[in-house]
Amino acid sequence: MTTQFLVEQIRKKESFLCIGLDTDLDKIPKHLLDEDDPIFAFNKAIIDATHHLCVAYKPNTAFYEAYGIKGWQALEKTIDYLNSNYPEIFTIADAKRGDIGNTSSRYAKAFFEDLGFNSVTIAPYMGRDSVEPFLAFKDKHTILLALTSNMGAFDFQTKMVDGRELYKEVLEISKSYKNSENLMYVVGATKATFLTEIRKIIPESFLLVPGVGAQGGSLSEVCKYGMSKNVGLLVNSSRGIIYASNQQDFAQVSAEKAKELQLEMSMELKKL
């Protein structure tokens, strides 16, 4: 999927909402546990109820890896379902991979070719040769961890390196990578005030912004400091949407929560 197509979908739906499919068998409605594949049954219901309100879905692969081969099969079925029924949706494998050379190439092949994701999250700690193999895939996107929403982000990401915070070095150096036009970046919503400085370095790049909702991030703050002329934002909400209810009406309630965010986003887009 091209960036331009993603922008078109954002404007068409008046939404830059990404829904995190962090599916946990301990949290989904109990009646789904009788299904042959409870994870896929839950995901399918959420997708069918919310696809018109969002432009992206982001399964965190840990929630699937935890269930072994059945989890991976559920992930594959989920992405196949999205690609077959809602091909306009941008898909993100939240896998946070980061290795070098042939290993990165194999990871990229797994997520982009075998599973058919549009993008994957990558940890940049090992540098250029751990990132560029992902960037080599046409119309696929590599989402680099820049400034994350967790408290531990301050352990390293904001430390000074030669007079500059490490996350700023990541942003600046990554612009020199081959096919860097396929880069996006993770910036947590709880770090919204940092977005002014981030936009000075990457003014037009898309940012994947987790942390709105259950983690307490502010959508209006994210938009105030981070929105670009081409929107440039994918704001993620996971638990606040998918676990809004554990009853029979869970998908409907999830859609209502997604609609609330979509309406806020529509208002923000009108300010552009």
Image (cartoon, rainbow, N blue to C red):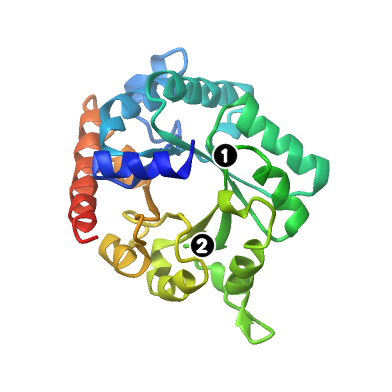
Task: Tell me the element at label 2.
Answer: loop
Write down the residue under mark 2: 148
Q: Residue 53 lies in what quarter of the image?
A: top left
Q: Amino acid at mark 2?
A: Thr
Kindly identify which residue carries mark 1.
140
Left or right: residue 104 versus residue 48 is right
Image position of 201 with respect to 243: above or below: below
The residue located at (47%, 24%) in the rendering is 78
Front-most of 163 and 140?
Answer: 140
Give the residue drawn at x 45%, y 66%: 203
**Position above or below: 26 against 147:** above
Amino acid type for the residue under numbered disc 1 = Lys
The residue at the point 33 percent across, 64 percent down is: 222
> From the viewer's perspective, is the residue at label 2 or at label 1 nearer?
1
How packed is label 1: few (under 14 Cα within 10 Å), some, or many (20 or more)? many
Q: Is residue 157 visible?
A: no
Q: Position of residue 69 (x, y in %)?
A: 63, 22
Q: Residue furthest right?
A: 102
19 is higher (above) or lower (below) than 189: above
With 122 as the anchor, is 199 left or right in this view?
left
Label 1 element class: loop
Judge left or right: residue 255 versus residue 81.
Answer: left
Nearest to the observer: residue 261 or residue 86: 86
Q: Position of residue 180 (x, y in %)?
A: 62, 54
How far apart in space, not on screen, are marks 2 and 1 (Cα)?
A: 22 Å
Marks 2,1: beta carbons within 8 A: no
Q: What residue lies at 34% left-to-right and 70% top-to-bottom?
A: 225
